[in-house]
Amino acid sequence: KMKQVRIISYVTDGNGNPVNDLSTTVASLKDNVEGYDPDLWLVVSGDAQSTYDFTHNGQKLLQQGKEYYGGHAFQELMLLLDKKNHLRMVLSGKTEGMVRRMRDNIALLQKQYDKERKH
């Protein structure tokens, strides 16, 4: 439904380091996510920490602590960026409710784009 949207998932080990073999993750998505489309949901390996290395609303996303998965906050965060790469939202991805909230906000952003296209 949202062909303009791209999901990028960085695959890391428990310490936030890149994982080279992505085949298990991709196979899991194919088996467990209805309608999984590899053209829309990109599974990548690389330095995820550099992507999350910024401060937003006075908070640094590269926080560390025992309360975070693997000790690093960035490993459980979802970012919503618009087509101009402006950060729209940062949410925890640990709960289904937050994933639904992200989906709803993606739909709102899509509506905004559709409205702009009509004018």
Image (tube, rainbow, N blue to C red):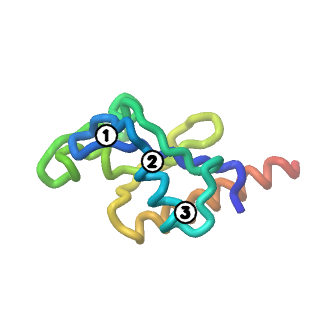
- Place of residue 3 in the rendered image (x, y in percent of width and height, measured from the top left): 71, 53
Labels 2 and 1: the sequence-earlier one:
2
- Circle 2 residue: 23
> In the rendered structure, which amino acid carries the disc numbered 1?
Leu
Q: Secondary structure at mark 1?
A: loop
> What distance separates the C-alpha of mark 3 from that of mark 1?
21 Å
Residue drawn 87% across the image and 52% down it:
118
Residue 76 lies, with reference to residue 51, above or below; the image says below
Residue drawn 38% across the image and 44% down it:
11
- Place of residue 81 in the rendered image (x, y in percent of width and height, measured from the top left): 55, 43
- Circle 1 residue: 61
- Place of residue 49 in the rendered image (x, y in percent of width and height, measured from the top left): 33, 33
Q: Secondary structure at mark 3?
A: helix
Quick one: which residue is furthest to the left in this view?
Answer: 66
Q: Secondary structure at mark 2?
A: helix
Labels 2 and 3: the sequence-earlier one:
2
> In the rendered structure, which amino acid carries the disc numbered 3?
Arg
Residue 109 lies, with reference to residue 97, above or below; the image says above
Dot 3, crowdedness within 10 Å: few (<14), some or many (≥20)?
Answer: few
Q: Is residue 38 left or right of residue 114?
A: left
Q: Is residue 30 visible?
A: yes
- Circle 3 residue: 103
